[in-house]
């Protein structure tokens, strides 16, 4: 036989535990209380949500080991149909021969004398290549989008290869 005090305490515990449960249904759904004659058996489902941090973006690797002899100039040669052209040239060291290079332009800032930001993207050779550190000449040429540039910044991967502050005008 059950004692009335024990049954009352068990029912009270059941009500308290039922209030702690979370419901997947509508928020106004109520739990049915446990019958007072049977011992209350309430199970509480605890769901732990662990949010994994977003993977940190690793800096992009650059195949360029070293660079030097960077120069920049704006060619303003007169003539019919002549357009001012910006030129950037330098030398880079890579791990083997056969690399090809392409340039990507980053957006310019809106200052009166903007900064030209370029990204050098080297591509490794697909076939056989000389397995020795090789020096390659790289050059960029495009119509000048500004009459002057305050500097030219050349990047590769997550590193800055050069920052040219003296941009010459060539006539």
Image (cartoon, rainbow, N blue to C red):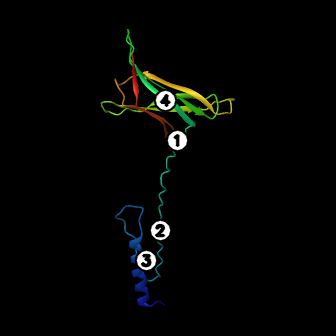
The disc, 4 or 2, on the residue closer to the chain's N-terminal end is 2
Residue 78 is situated, as x and y percent measured from the top left of the image, at 37, 12
Dots 4 and 2: beta carbons under 8 Å?
Answer: no
Q: Quadrant of residue 115?
A: top left
Q: Which circle marks residue 46 in the picture?
A: 2
The residue under label 3 is 34
Q: Which residue is mark 1?
A: 60
Task: State which mark lies toward you, 1 or 4.
Answer: 4
Residue nearer the viewer, 103 or 92: 92
The answer to which of 114 and 9 lies nearer the viewer is: 114
In the image, 26 versus 20, the foreground residue is 20
Q: Position of residue 54 (x, y in %)?
A: 48, 51
Q: CA distance from mark 1 to mark 4?
A: 22 Å
Mark 4 and mark 2: span between their CA atoms? 63 Å
SS at badge 1: loop
Please tell me the numbered disc located at residue 70.
Answer: 4
Q: For the point 40% across and 72% down, which residue is it?
A: 20
- Say above or below: 60 vs 29: above
């Amino acid at each position: 036989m059950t004692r009335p005090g024990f049954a009352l305490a068990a029912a009270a515990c059941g009500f308290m535990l039922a209030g702690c449960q979370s419901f997947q249904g509508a928020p106004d759904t109520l739990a049915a209380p446990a019958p007072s004659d049977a011992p209350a058996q309430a199970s509480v489902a605890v769901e732990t949500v662990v949010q994994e941090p977003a993977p940190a973006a690793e800096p992009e690797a650059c195949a360029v080991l070293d660079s030097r002899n960077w120069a920049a100039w704006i060619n303003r040669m007169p003539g019919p149909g002549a357009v001012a052209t910006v030129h950037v040239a330098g030398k880079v060291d890579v791990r083997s021969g056969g690399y090809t290079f392409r340039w990507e332009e980053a957006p310019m800032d809106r200052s009166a004398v903007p900064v030209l930001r370029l990204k050098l993207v080297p591509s490794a050779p697909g076939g056989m290549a000389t397995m020795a550190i090789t020096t390659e000449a790289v050059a960029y040429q495009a119509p000048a989008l500004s009459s002057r540039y305050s500097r030219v910044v050349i990047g590769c991967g997550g590193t800055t290869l050069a920052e040219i502050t003296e941009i010459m005008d060539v006539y």
